[in-house]
Image (tube, grey):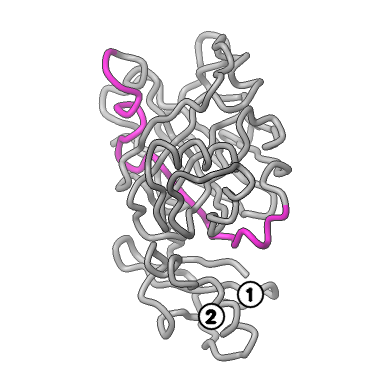
Amino acid sequence: MQLVRLGEPGSERPYVRADDGTTYGLSGLTADVDGGFLATGGLARVAAALAAGELPAEDVTGLRVGSPIAQPGKVVCIGMNYRRHAEETGATPPTEPVVFMKAPDVVVGPGDDVLIPRKSVSTDWEVELGVVIGTTARYLDSVEEALDHVAGYVVSNDVSERAFQFSAGQWDKGKSCENFNPLGPALVPAAQVPDPQDLGLRLWVNGEKKQDSSTKDMIFSVAEIIHHLSQVMVLRPGDLINTGTPEGVALGQPDPKPYLRDGDVIELEIDGLGRQRQTARQA
């Protein structure tokens, strides 16, 4: 099963899509797919209701696809987490996870426009595996227990404005612009992803493939990231972790770098998690 949220921004309703493609309404079980829902066994309740035939099938034709989770409490991102991405940008591979934050309100639907900020000269794409926390992770004792705290996985586009990112100040300035985190189309429960370190991820701009890699190339695994973060912050249900991007971003390409321009179409996908499509528009 896959959890989706459909409807206009701010008015999304929760649904579950069964393996045969039928979409069922979840309004009788929960008002939204949020931290409270995940923390109280929401995914298990949905699976049980779906198996028992207790959910109403609904026609969702024409409905906008929103982010599959409600606005998270926080968005934690990991930089330089793919070996070949570090190589293409000339960076030394980190010896511990590089952590930065993204404003939670930049999370939007997988088909919503990417807004190029005013005065931007270097808006970039980044396909990433997104991890949604299901239960509180605080001072975990071991890496081995980390994945027990994952609710599910999503496709995430960690859009970045490189001039803002690397100017004086913090990376966050280039990461928290409006609409800078398309997410979805669906939240896939962790139980349906046997190995998060064996997922192919790809991205195209205007039909040209730019990124084509695997989570096998991660420097720090999903479990290692969660364990590390739990030592420096509390990860709460509904929080989103963007786990880094592979090689192929505009930043790593020869001059003139092909940063996004008004009208460009970005498409991205991860094995088993779905596909996104956005159009870049001037803000």
Q: Secondary structure at mark 2?
A: strand
| Horizontal and vertical percent position of residue 228 | 50, 36
- 232 lies above or below 171: below
| Horizontal and vertical percent position of residue 89 | 55, 13
Give the residue displayed 40% in from the left and 20% down from the top.
162
The C terminus appears in which quarter of the rendering?
A: top left
| Horizontal and vertical percent position of residue 44 | 56, 74
Residue 276 or residue 78, whichever sits in front: 78
Give the residue displayed 32% in from the left and 29% down from the top.
172
Q: Is residue 171 magenta?
A: yes
Residue 231 or residue 248, whichever sits in front: 231
Q: Is residue 44 magenta?
A: no
Give the residue displayed 57% in from the left and 35% down from the top.
206
Which circle marks residue 106 in the picture?
A: none
Report the number of numbered marks: 2
Crowding at dot 1, Cα within 10 Å, few <14 / some 14-19 / many 20+, comes out as: some
The amino acid on which the numbered mark 1 sits, given as a three-letter code, is: Ala
The amino acid on which the numbered mark 2 sits, given as a three-letter code, is: Tyr
Crowding at dot 2, Cα within 10 Å, few <14 / some 14-19 / many 20+, comes out as: many
> 99 left or right of 149?
left
Give the residue displayed 30% in from the left and 48% down from the top.
105
**Which residue matches tag 1?**
18
Q: CA distance from mark 2 to mark 1?
A: 8 Å
Q: Quadrant of residue 274?
A: bottom right
**Span colored in magenta:** 168-194
> 277 left or right of 18?
left
**Which residue matches tag 2?**
24
Q: Secondary structure at mark 1?
A: loop
| Horizontal and vertical percent position of residue 131 | 53, 48
- 179 lies above or below 60: above
Badge 2 or badge 1: first in the primary sequence: 1
- Whether the residues at callouts 2 and 1 have beta carbons within 8 Å, the answer is yes
